[in-house]
Amino acid sequence: MVKIAVLGCGTVGGGVFKLIKQNANDIEQRIGQKVEVKKVLERDADKAHSIGVTTELCTSYDEILQDDEIKIIVELIGGTEFAYDCIIKAIEAGKNVVTANKDLLAIKGEEIFSLAKQKGVDICFEASVAGSIPIIGPMQNVLCANTFSAIVGILNGTTNYILTKMNDFGLSYEEALKQAADLGYAEANPSSDVEGTDAARKIAILGSLAFNSRCTLSNVYCEGITKIVEKDIILAKKLGYTIKLIGMAKEKDDKIILFVRPTFVPMSHPLASVNDVFNAVFLKCDAADEIMLYGRGAGEMPTASSVVGDVMTICNSIANNTTGQHGLDCYKQKEILPIGELESSFCLRLRVADKPNVLAGIASELGNRGVSIESVIQSPVPDVDMASLTIITHKAKEQALQDAISSLKEKEYVEKAYIFMCLDKTN
Ligand code: NDP
Ligand code: HSE
């Protein structure tokens, strides 16, 4: 019997209790021993009882730390303060840890993983990226012979749910966000979903794993979905794209670039058909070439699937006396490039005065910086002598485009100018 403690009886904690109970017999057969939740830490007793917790609740975390029978602590509280203390103290007490806490790992990963290694305990975190999708395990195990060059993903269930509902069903942003929160997909503070921070944390974790070099939240260029307007969605559709919040980590010449941003994804790209709460991670590597993993990116039972899987992995490590092997060691130090170094094609959206020489002025601002135009669509804005311009560029450096936009914004004929990155197979 392996005895564990669970911290937090919210959405994911609730799923973990259900799954351990529901599949108890198979879990025991597969790992050769029973898993028992011996202690629970949750400040809201009613919440714990409502999800079927019968174990007495601890009044302090020390009760768990001091219990020598508890070998694994499952941290499902979230946040970076109390959860940080819990994880550090667990490792110091020689306990193995399972966590879904990307907030913490994306900023304190180095400290947590090196302490775990030093103390010879496992720290497993499959649920921290893309909910139910097995991505950490495959990258660390069956794909570990590969050199990775890029990871592109839809890494946040809440925003993908919102974009799908806005795109396919015409729901308002507010209605769609409320539904995602009611379904348990959103973070305690959903601004981290919609501002892109949650996906940025996940791409930092995946970047660290893929390139063996520590990437943190502060290394990720991040834009959320709050500025997308209905007109952008309609335009993308007309041009054969769909807008997705894309996270990407790519390596070139030993340097890494990481970002999260709303992106025009061509309908022919496999990521375009990933909808609702589903996430997908597209990997490019030297031997396996291209792989895409797909599944539910958030929610009670999908996330519990990853958490309980990690608990079972550690049970096997304990049985084989091999703890201390699961973590995220980074043995290289690679330079992080600023977003201006990104090369891609872009969709430039402008609202401009509808008069002579405007198009020529814009073309020359772009051309002078080496940005070549692939196509232009102009449509009049009714009643105001303005025009809406959509310019798709050929592949260009983002810095060149940003410089052109800064200069264009100074012109009296430009009212608005912003870009979307366009994804293609070469990104
Ligand atoms: P919830 O907010 O639903 O659950 C967290 C639970 O922890 C709440 O019951 C909360 O109680 C309790 N808690 C918070 N602080 C303390 C404390 N100091 N002492 C005791 N209990 C405390 O969050 P989720 O279950 O959604 O998320 C948990 C973790 O999993 C987070 O790190 C999240 O990012 C991650 N995650 C979530 C996914 C999802 O789909 N929801 C998917 C993947 C990862 P109270 O309500 O009283 O504050
Ligand atoms: N809030 C997150 C999401 C939970 O919507 O993807 C899963 O990490």
Image: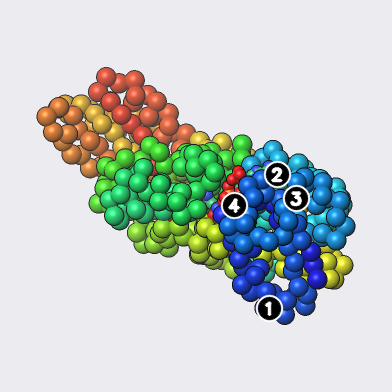
The residue to which callout 3 is attached is: 58
On the rendered structure, is 416 left or right of 42? left
Mark 2 → mark 3, Cα distance in angstroms? 16 Å
Give the colour scheme shown. Answer: rainbow
Residue closer to the observer: 288 or 356: 288
The dot on residue 276 is none
Q: Considering only order in the chain, which callout, 3 or 1, is on the residue closer to the N terminus?
A: 1
Which marked residue is nearer to the observer: mark 1 or mark 3?
3
Q: Which residue is located at x 37 percent, y 48 percent?
A: 176
Q: Which amino acid type is shown beneath numbered disc 2?
A: Ala
Q: Which amino acid type is shown beneath numbered disc 4?
A: Lys
Q: Which residue is located at x 85 percent, y 47 percent?
A: 92
Number of other residues with Cα within 10 Å of mark 1, as a class: few under 14, some 14 to 19, many 20 or more = few
The residue to which callout 4 is attached is: 47
Mark 1 → mark 2, Cα distance in angstroms? 31 Å
Q: Considering only order in the chain, which callout, 2 or 4, is on the residue closer to the N terminus?
A: 4
Q: Which amino acid type is shown beneath numbered disc 3?
A: Cys
Mark 4 → mark 1, Cα distance in angstroms? 26 Å
Q: Which residue is located at x 30 percent, y 21 percent?
A: 411
Mark 1 → mark 3, Cα distance in angstroms? 27 Å
Mark 3 → mark 4, Cα distance in angstroms? 14 Å
126 w.r.t. 403: above or below? below
Q: Which amino acid type is shown beneath numbered disc 1?
A: Asn
Number of other residues with Cα within 10 Å of mark 4, as a class: few under 14, some 14 to 19, many 20 or more = some
The residue to which callout 1 is attached is: 25
The residue to which callout 2 is attached is: 83
